[in-house]
Every structure is written in structure tokens, then in C-alpha cells.
Image (cartoon, rainbow, N blue to C red):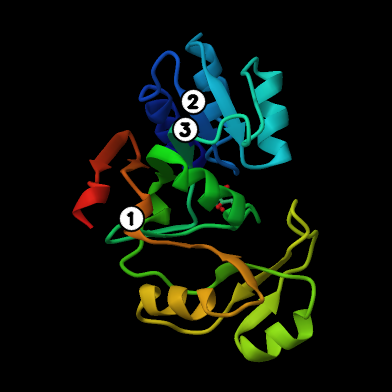
Amino acid sequence: MTVDEEKYAAAAFAAGLVEDGMRVGLGTGSTVAPLIPALAARGLSLRCVATSDATAHAAVAAGLVVESFDQLPELDIAIDGADQIAPGPWLIKGGGRAHTREKLVAAAAGRFVVIASHEKVVPRLSAPVPLELLAFGLTSTLRRLRYAVPREGPQSPDGGIIADWTGEFDDPQALALLLEADPGVVGHGLFPPSYVTDVVVATGQHIEHTQHDRDAR
Ligand code: 5RP
């Protein structure tokens, strides 16, 4: 099975977790891409929030109802990919520049389901960690965050500068706190275990679905 087939399999499994009448957050990226037609094919009555224009367009084209986040501020479930999944589960997200929106949508969801092909599972997180930085004072912010490197390409849809933390780190919680303490950091791609309720990983034909209790953390 190829990595793309694994992404499809994980996405199809996650589509099966969605129930009629749910408010659904849709992530961004190549693992979410096959989720959208799989969800539409179920023919359920759903209301969706998208984390990027690309996802919104694909969802509408597939026949899903997409509303603004302010119209749907509470979600039953959100489904999204990840760049790295480490024990915890801790995640790194933001390869697709959407991590700030994705974190907001995950935080609004009763259940946050992460879908991935097998190579996303790692023993420990490592750089790069995507960042979104405020454009105002960017040079000053980059001087403070010695290991932040602006990424080539467009700004975030909310006008933020996309960069990557390239330094080494052992403790993701300590790095998250360091980044959150800087006034120039709008968001970062470290997602702690408190966000994640489900991880669905496809390894060849095998799907591993683990569930995590947010309240236990
Ligand atoms: C976008 C993300 C994606 O979920 C992450 O980059 C994984 O992408 P893909 O499913 O294409 O491998 O965080 O900001």
C-alpha cells in the first residue's frame, strides 16, 4: 500500500466516526483531501467549518455545507492530519500553514481526530515546528526567537508570517511555553495531548485507532 493509499484509508475510517447532524471541523492537507469525498458520500446532514480556503472549496464542491466559524463556534468533531505524532499524543502540525486555524478549530471540538499514514508516527517530536508570527515587529521577533526561520511562500490566511522553529528541543511543553511567552508569536504547531481525543494511523492494510481521555490530563 502506498502512503497516499494509507492516507485514504485513515480518512475513510475517520469519515465513519461522523454521525448524522454533527457539526464538523475540517482540517487541511493531503490526508484531509480524501476525507472530504468520503464524508460527502455518507449522505449525512452535516454542518462544517473549514480551516483553509482550499478545504472550504473542496468541501463545497463535494456537496458539504460549509459555514463560518462564527456561525458554528462549537463543533462535535474535528478531523485533521499531522506532520508528526509522538507519544502522549503530542503533535506537530502546520506543514500546510494552517496550524493557527487548525488549533482554534480543534479547541472548539468535542472530539479531535488525527488521521495519518504510518510515517507520521515518530518516537519524539523534532524540528521544524511551524510558527505564525505577527508581521508587525517581525525583525525584532526573529531576533528574540533565534531559531525561527521565515518560510518561503504566502502569509497565513489571517496575514501572519509563516516561519519554522529549527532549534533542537527535548521537551515540547517547555518549547510551547517559550513560544507562547513571546508577544510576536501568534501561534505554533505544537499540539499537546490535551487537544487530541483520537488518533487513526494506517499502516498498510491495518488501521490503528487509539482513543485518549482529555479529562485525564
Ligand atoms: C496543515 C497541517 C496538516 O495537517 C499537516 O501538514 C499534514 O499534512 P498532510 O496531510 O498533507 O501530510 O497541519 O497545516
Residue count near mark 2 (Cα–Cα under 10 Å), binned few <14, some 14–19, many ≥20: many
Query: What number is the disc on residue 23?
Result: 2
Give the image location of residue 80, x and y in percent: 49, 42
Q: Residue drawn at (71%, 37%), measured in percent from left and top?
A: 54
How many discs appear? Answer: 3
Expressed as whole percent of the image width and height from the top left, the position of residue 73 reads: 54, 36
Q: Is mark 3 in CB contact (under 8 Å) with mark 2?
A: yes
Report the disc number at residue 148: none
Foreground: 97 or 176?
Answer: 176
Q: Which mark is residue 194?
A: 1
**From where the camera sits, is residue 2 visible?**
no
Mark 3 = which residue?
A: 75
Q: In whole angstroms, how far apart are the C-alphas of marks 3 and 2?
A: 5 Å
Residue found 47% across the figure and 42% down from its top = 108
For the C terminus, the image quarter is bottom left
Label whose residue precedes the other's in the sequence (3 or 2): 2
195 left or right of 98 in image: left
Taking the spot 58% from the left edge, 55% from the top edge, the residue there is 99
- Secondary structure state at the residue bearing disc 2: strand
Q: Earlier in the sequence, mark 1 or mark 3?
A: 3
126 relative to 30, above or below: below
Look at label 2 and name its amino acid. Arg
- Ligand 1 within 8 Å, label 2 CB: no
- Neighbor class of circle 3 (other Cα within 10 Å; few <14, some 14-19, many 20+) is many
Q: Amino acid at mark 3?
A: Leu
**SS type, badge 1:** helix
Circles 1 and 2: CB distance less than 8 Å? no
The x and y percentages for residue 52 are: 68, 42
Marks 1 and 2, the one that precedes in the sequence:
2
Q: Amino acid at mark 1?
A: Ser
